[in-house]
Amino acid sequence: MTMDDGKLTRRQFGAIGLVLALSSRAVSAEKTRLHRFGYDHVLGTSMDLVVAVNDPARAEDCESAVLEEIERLRRILSTYDPASEISRLNDTRLPVRVSPELLEVLALYEAWRVRTRGAFNGQLGGLLGLWKDAEASGQLPDDAVLAGVAREIDGAATDLDVEAGTARRRSSQRLNVDALGKNYILAKALQAGRTRVPEATGILLSIGGDLFSCGVGPDGPWSVGVADPRKPCDNAAPLARLRLEDRALASSGSYQRFFTVGGRRIPRMIDPRTGRPALSVLGASVLAPDPVTADALSTTLCVLGPTEGLRLIAAIPDVDAVIVDADGGVHASPGWNKRAEPVEIAQQQPNPGWPVGFEVSIELALAKTPKPAAGKPYRRPYVAVWIEDGAGKPVRTITVWGKDPKHIKELSTWWAFGSKDAMLFQAVGKATRDGGSYKLSWDGTDDKGKPVPPGVYVVQIEVNREFGQHIRNMTAALPCKAKPSKADLAGNAEVDGVKIRFGAGTP
């Protein structure tokens, strides 16, 4: 998570994706109405807000309160804003007068450092910098240098004087409060919305995938999903679905975030006690009464092994967790299933006509630096990816990125058939994505879940960006038969390239 200063853009959305999946049951006229708001470029990520209240104007009042509180706290906690309080503190080793909010966040970091015996630490800036330098040079960092930095941050990061309202850095390492800072803001922002609109029966707020809820929706507790670290594909089914009421859910993991050093992928989850990557856990999710606790623990569980991590969870009241280890094993605290009230997810059956373990993987690289139109702001592209058979008949819509009905219709090739099935879009529609590489998969079933026969299938990709270009001719024929096959698509103004593979073990 980064608290950058990117331009805030609003997106109204009609459904939230698998990691924030709302109940699809119809809401009668007598029930409280749901009002949904979405923004890109909030603290360097996306924000989704759902307000359960009958008056649309009051829902917008809640939205305003949430955004105002986020911006107020960003100016305090953003390490990407040189004028923020944390940046001013990082610029000196002298005491700096700071706000009560920054004092509180710094005290939380120290409390969690002590509680986790150093597995959670807010002084990772230097270590991350060493690994970024390694990525640039192609050479792994020196073990002695990593160990030296780890020793330097093995202690309190700051001296705090609450009465004087000052903080002072104790080491040469720069402070980075992005992790707990985001979830601290998440909690304060939801509280601000609740205070301004107390008649709302429920509010659900997500920033960067971490969730906090108060109250309930029209159908009871909010139904949300937990991402499965074993399936990093953007369109993968969740590990579980939970019922969330007055609780926070945070997930951490390095299964999609790596340093690339000399051709090797190194997980970005760093153990502050050693300076080296934490390799025993793919990801962890924590249910807790507040977002800060959930985030601190989910991060810590990725550093500790599953056994030690569950011992820590058992020692903290009113929290539960699930951990997926590096081998794909799932470890849950005793109260996870009881507290989470998991919703059963039907397991997808493999296509009996394909070789065992085969699937289609699609690695789509959206352009990181698309050419902007003169005098126009950058807008995230709308994207549709689907499969057709050899006769050109649509078989399976893999995903659609984008929510605004106006721009969805401008994906004209996909819209020609996708508009005929409202449930199809609800199942696959997700928020837009920033530039970067994303993985998708196809298991060989159609939109109704029925396996398709072996044959040649066509991967179709359509991209349309406001103030950008509309790309409609990205297609690749792929034999899906008895042997592995592959196809590559060249880049263009909106896409850096696409790699498509049919075979076993292609996540």
Image: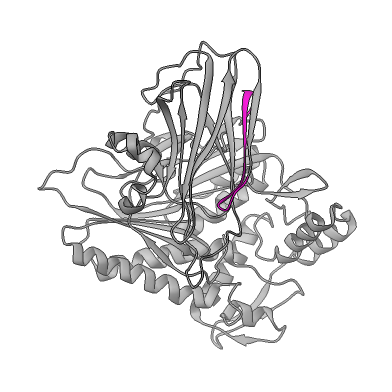
Q: Who is closer to the viewer here, 114 or 179?
A: 179
Magenta segment includes 497: yes
Q: Indicate left or right for 133 with 360 as reference.
A: right
Most foreground residue, 265 or 75: 265
Looking at the image, residue 38 lies above or below residue 322: below
Residue 178: % across, % down = 58, 65
**As drawn, 455 above or below 470:** above
Q: What stretch is highlighted in magenta?
A: 491-506
> Which corner quadrant holds the C terminus?
top right
Residue 88 sits in quarter = bottom right
Residue 254 vs 64, above or below: the answer is: above
In-image side of 389 versus 1 (left or right):
left
Q: In which quarter of the image is residue 179?
A: bottom right
- Provide residue 361's location: percent of width, then percent of height: 58, 31
Q: Is residue 97 left or right of residue 39?
A: right
Q: Can residue 132 be seen in this view?
A: yes
